Amino acid sequence: MTFTAPPGTDIRTAKGRTLPQLLCDRAREHAQKECMREKKYGVWLTYTWEDVLDRIYATARGLALLGFTRGDVLAILSENIVESFWVEYAALAIGARVVCAYPDLTSQELRYILDHSQAKLLLAEDQEQVDKYLMIKKHLPGLKKVLYIDPRGLWHYQHPELVAYTDVIKAGKKNPATDRQWVDQEIAQGSQDDVASICYTSGTTGVPKGAMLSHRFLLDGAYRIMAAHRVSPHAAYLSYISPAWAAEQLMGFALGLLSPLVINFAEKPETVRRDLREVGPEYLLFTPRQWEMLASDVQAHMLDAGFLRQALYRWAVSVGTAGRKKDASFLNRDVLLPLAELLVLRHIRDNLGLSNTTVPLSGGSGLSPQLFELFHAFGVPLRNVYGTTELGLLSSHWNNDFDPATMGQFLPSDPTIGRPIEGWVDELGQLRVRCCAFSGYLKNEAATAELGRCEDGYKTGDAVRLDESGQLIFLDRLKDLRRLRNGHAFPPQFIENSLRASPFIKDVMVLGDKQSDYVAALINVDPQICGRFAERRGLAFGTFTELSQLPEVRAQVGEAIRSVNRRLDAAARITAFATLPKELDADEAELTRSRKLRREQIANRYQDIIVAIYTGQESCNANIKVRYEDGREMLMTTRVPIDRLAELHQ
Amino acid sequence: MSVAVLGWTKLASHACASDVADPDRAVLEARGLDLQFGAITALRSVDLKVYGKTIHSVIGPNGAGKSSLLNCLSGFYRPQAGAVIYRGEDITRHAPHARARAGLARTFQGIQTYQSMSVRDNILAGLHVHMRTGLWSGLVYWTGVRAEEQRFKWEAEEIIEFLELEELRHSLVGSLSYGLRKRVDLGRALALRPNVLITDEPMAGMSADEKGDLARFILDIRDGRNIPIVLVEHDMEVVMDISDTVTVMDWGRVIASGPPQQVRNDPTVVAAYLGKPR
């Protein structure tokens, strides 16, 4: 059965404009209104649309002076800062393409992206990022200039290709070869089908692929969210998710112009929690991991609270859950809920910075239903959003009826851009959709062809169910849905998401395949929560390895697994687990930069433990190669007990 | 946007332009300093020249006279003979607070912060030495007082940003780790708007990571704010890594002085640290 999204009714359509053209329109309409805010020296500085446009024009002229022209590629290696937004808009204004890279990439990962995208210019935020470039510069002959924002530590660098961004702006303003009319002409030449941004996939299944996203694609994606969630004009938005993720290109960059939004930038990544509270954004997109961290933070604080406060918190959460249900009793909805709000819930929202948030979204992989319900109990109307880099945002909870186990319904598209989203489930259980899509993978036609054609429905590669009302239920990646030796299928991602809801568990990898008789799990415990737990009980530990192997910590993990097991078929339940003796680390290629598991790598590194789990051993000696920041490698040998849940029950 | 904020960065670079422009002229100099405590001689004819935009480290075994030298430079001890010359002026007889006002800032081995005050308030306390408005105008809270207060807040925030303490600006110093308290101490010294920063064992008791961070801040103070630094430190790896000049003391005397590589290979220094081979 094919489901079709309703048509978009919001009048703020793209009307054939590109991102820079929309920027000019907005600057004309709202010249003196707030466009961006950044926290500097402890206070919030405001940039009006006119301020921003001035800087973008000057930057565009400065880039032209550096020989940067239409069709060239600009790479950005930076946290979310206001300057990176200006440079990206300026590059788009003169018809260039932009590649954003995660700021915690290693130099070799960066080399692949810069080389593959043939970047001609790099914006590196600070010394750390410039140093990464200098380590690989001999492999990048095509990269001509490197702009930097923060000059600290770069005072003595003698590399002719390094240019301060402030100098680019100054030079741009004085560039005799160009003027504002020149920039206007360049902007006018742009077409919606031009590629604006190249987003590299996380590389969970091999080398990253560069997905080319056009202006049309980005604006349609932004419209889908805006129309479905009725994002109000000039709503406050905190730019926090990395611009290297396509979602921020849709949300911060495209929706920021289409809606428009007031984009806020945190002072530092470490101050985001405090800044979030100060901004009080109305509209917010976090990854499930970030929502989990917020919830963990509340739970960690409650672990430290006294008995009375803990009891009050538990009561308020239970009332918040019961009182917000559609069929809530008069007592719960009209008596107890206002009381819980007054005493507890509104203070939690305030502390989390979510008091004003009307559109809180969770994107990426699925968020566990327990966490979803917890935020709803707090009074935060959290909504799932589902999409892919290649096809944009496809579905979300966007009306009052929603089920935390689903990803919502198909979103309405911009009528001036493309057809409404149509979706169905094929014979393999895979979601197929017809919609406005990306412009293909850069230099990889074979991978582009694998995705299929619009007329036949793009292959998403996701195993889903669509219920009678068109609610999309995400099961797993098609290739990740696994079967045991006895033929029973189990959804590893669902189990992992559910387990991560436990504050004791930071990451988890579910084991089990056609050679296995049962499902098992490798658990990466949360050192902060487990550390506090151990301290409160006077348990001695010195290192993460000791902490992770404490019997009391393993018992807590076992308890969390048992609670998830209750929601699974008997055959899909986790029967054995081990807590990893070291934390999973992106620098050791165990995680991607967006903190997704690199399963093959993990399976290889912890082979000893996996073998012990499936050969019925009680414990094993794990030999793990550890790489330090200075490049040294060491073999860590430690005894890891294997916990079997049947034994724990006894 | 408030342009004043960006303008502040220029204000914050306090080092005298002439100190930076003339590298041959010593900003701070000790000439033949002698210091005795009864029968004990702490310093014997000690000479030291600190030039603009350099890190000048003073090293030596325990009891070599390093801290005594710093105390003479910052005015806590008065030498029996010799002189301390600061930017061409003899300041041997000047009191510590007068030297601080003139731009000689000092941090001590022990932490000298106010534990029950926030990070920002500790740094603001360092700025009070530059307050120009008096008691009466302060009581009335005139425009000038408010403007000065605002200026000091900007300056404190700029130091907080420089030392990457944003996340902790409102935290009580007493609740911070030892390494972070040392960083706040350094921030308070920077609030004195120094022309020379004298710092005594800033890395004592720190972890390797904290030492790395502090070494980076010391380099940034030299390069970004053009402030010469006199550093007493026991961690030889750090000293040799970041110093422009190293002076080695033993039994109250200077036994070697020069670039780190030269000092490292000096046989007198090797003997003082490792003992003479038999």
Image: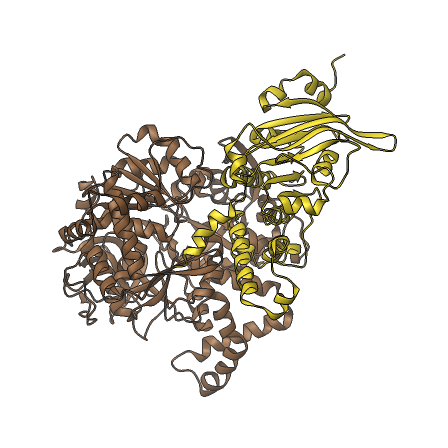
Chain colours: A brown, B yellow
Question: Residue drawn 58% across and 44% down?
Answer: A545
Left/right placement of residue A575 relative to residue A142 reads: right
Residue B38 quadrant: top right
A617 vs A529, nearest the viewer: A529
| Residue A209 seen in render | no
Residue B188, x across and y down, in percent: 62, 50
User: How many numbered markers are drawn?
Assistant: 0
User: Which residue extends farthest bottom?
Assistant: A330
Left/right placement of residue B165 relative to residue B257 reads: left
Residue A544, x across and y down, in percent: 58, 45
Residue B81, x across and y down, in percent: 78, 30
Residue A129 quadrant: top left
Left/right placement of residue A227 relative to residue A154 reads: left
Question: Residue drawn 32% across and 40% down?
Answer: A122
| Quarter placement of the C terminus of chain A | bottom right
Left/right placement of residue B257 relative to residue A499 reads: right
Residue A209 quadrant: top left
B186 vs A205, nearest the viewer: B186
Residue A86, x across and y down, in percent: 31, 52
User: Which residue extends farthest front?
Assistant: B89
